[in-house]
Image: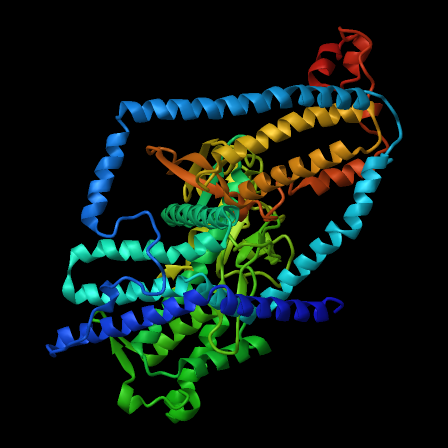
Amino acid sequence: MKYKVSNIITSFVLTATFVALAFFVFDTSYLRFAESAKDLWNSVRIYFCEIFGIRYSVEATVLSRSDVMSWNILLPADFESFTQKAKAYFSLLVDENNFKSWLVHSGRTTGNIAKALVIALPCTLILFFIIKKLYSKDNTRHNEDTLPLRIFKKVSNVTYQPLKRYIVNYIGYLREHNVLIVLWVAIWCFNLNIASIIVEFFAYYFYFAVSYKIDTLYLQICKLFIDLQVIFKAFPWWIIGIVAWLIFDKIRKNIADSTLRYFEAKNCGFINEVPIVSISCGSMGKKKTTLITDMALSQEVMFRQKAYKILQDNDMKFPYFPWIAFEDELRLCIEYGTVYNLATVKEWIKKKRERFERHENADLQLYGYDVERYGFYYNDALKVCALFDVLKTYALAYFVYVTESSLIVSNYSVRVDNTLLDRGNFPVWVMDFFPEGITDGRHAHIIDFDALRLGKKLIENNPKTGSFEFGVIAISEIGKERGNNLELKEVKKGTDETNQKNDLFNSWLKMCRHSATIDNYPFIKVFTDEQRPESWGADARDLCDIIHIVDSSEQRLAMPFYTIEEMISEWFFNRFISLYYDFRFKRGDNTLLVYLLKTVTSWLWRRNIRLYNRFGYCSLRIEKERGTMNARCEKKKYYLMNKKIYSRRFSTDCFSDYFNDMAKKTNVGLSDYLEYASEKATVEELKMQNSYFINTLYKDVK
């Protein structure tokens, strides 16, 4: 609130300044705009007269030189003169006298640079030794600022910091008031003659579309350079350089963003090739859990997109049906809890159909849909569908689409940041893995394995039994949950206790698509991981595709033309960090030089990190084979984008709290472990290991 008045005053002053500049400095640009508007009007008249064969006496003023801006550019007046001058220019490149003159000029310039270096080098060396002498003195004044640093901070507190805070606040104010930005952009488009260039382009376009005179193009190029004079004269070169750099940076970031989205599309293609159940395998640290998390996130988005596509297709089957009224009633039933899963959606549609067949009241059950006019059946050349069959498919897909929670169920936490936008009509999902800022969404559902067991349950009369119908299941370390054939050798199927042999979890895996199929598409996927595929029993593993992670590439950047900046950042960081920690070893106070160096280096380092976090990626080299493990492996690539998978998605130490709980109950740490007395362990030290091997060796020794 304290900046509100000052923001308004600043906006008024800036707007008044821009308008004043338009009248007193850039008035020529407005005269040139009027001239361009006249050219456009005449070109449009010629265009329509030529198209409709109307006789006209309109002059093509677009072919005339500007009467407002003088021809004071280096380009010749016509193309023939330009050709002659170009030949003369290129002939100078092989001219002996011109080459000698260039050598003389280069020698003078080099001599001046050498003189400056001769003067600067001793001064730099002296300054270096003075600073080294001052900073070589040891002290333990922890966190005390030196006098120069205290002076710098005080000056900064009354100059730079208030200005920075005000500018940041004002930028936020402008973002909330876009009309100001639009107004200023419009004013400067006219001031800098950009509006004239745009209008002149269309004027020549309409003329050239009916004349096709190529020889007039050179004149337009000359006029373009004349119009650009306003920009180059009004702004100093360094401002133009900054603007050009910002445009270049924006372009390469857009390229990087497009590259990441292309990688995501390739990943989705790979996920679609994988069957309903898959297991990702690899040694520790090969990013198994990262891979299944990434696939689960993409699969959730693809489920929403597929549901959306089903809605579109079924809408077109009965294009005049009041779908929005149908959706409103379904949303109310979901809100009141009468519809809460796919089974209840089917029951709801069944009751509507029975009521309609009993009363044939289209106003109540079909929201006023005119059956006689628009029809009750749809023939797709394969079968004939009644309206209620289509309504059933539509309602099921709509339920999947509008479910405002994560579709992921997992045995570890996964964060999703998809957002449902709803203005009271048809809702739209925002499902972008590469947003500009940081998002904060919801998390995956906690898995209850009893909901996936068709046989015995761990909890008798578990209310979640049979409740899971559709979604994405992610299970880390599946082998530790389900076990393999060898581990389950002693487990009996006929026992009263629930175990892996009598819970019929594998039967659920084989049949799970039946509860999740909508319009012949299964809305279910099970992603699992384990170090070895053999850790999961063959009965379940045979259903899967096994994804072997061979290796992971180094971090790469999707943004092009960043090599030099990265080299500068690394050079600054490597040079500063050794100096900084040497300084930390010797001194405990804070100095101005280190403060400034750290400010610059940390800015470069943080910028580099942000770019890699935003546009970085690595590729996994994987081999995919059938779960029967008797087929040839297919070599594939999968891309892990940092912004998508490492943006607080999941914790790689998802089971660490188990060990934390054990460690908190002890009073022993690493430092409390006894050390060996010498280079060779004694008998007593060997026995302290509580080793099976050592105990076996000494079990008969008394």
- Taking the spot 49% from the left edge, 59% from the top edge, the residue there is 431
Residue 352 drawn above or below residue 445: below
Q: Does residue 478 show up?
A: no
Residue drawn where x is 54% and y is 70% of the image: 19
Judge whether 92 appears above or below 157 on screen.
above
The spot of residue 309 in percent (x, y) is 37, 65
Going by the image, does 18 lie left or right of 52? Answer: right
Q: Quadrant of the N terminus?
A: bottom right
- The picture places residue 255, in percent across and down from the top left corner, at 42, 47
Viewer-nearest residue: 141 or 424: 141
Report the colour scheme.
rainbow
Of residues 193 and 613, the one nearer the viewer is 193
Residue 203 locus on image (x, y percent): 27, 67
* Above or below, comparing residue 529 to residue 310 in the picture: above
The image quadrant where one finds the C terminus is top right
Q: Residue at x 33, y 34 (%)?
A: 631
Q: Left or right of 567: which side holds 463?
A: right
Q: Nearer the viewer, residue 287 or 218?
A: 218
Above or below 339: residue 131: above
Q: Horizontal placement of 487 versus 321: left or right?
A: right
Residue sitting at 31 percent across and 75 percent down?
316
- Residue 147 falls left or right of residue 33: right
Give the camera-side residue of 594 and 535.
594
Q: Could you say which quadrant of the image residue 621 lies in?
A: top left
Say which quarter of the image contains residue 388: bottom left
Is residue 54 visible in the rendered image? The answer is yes
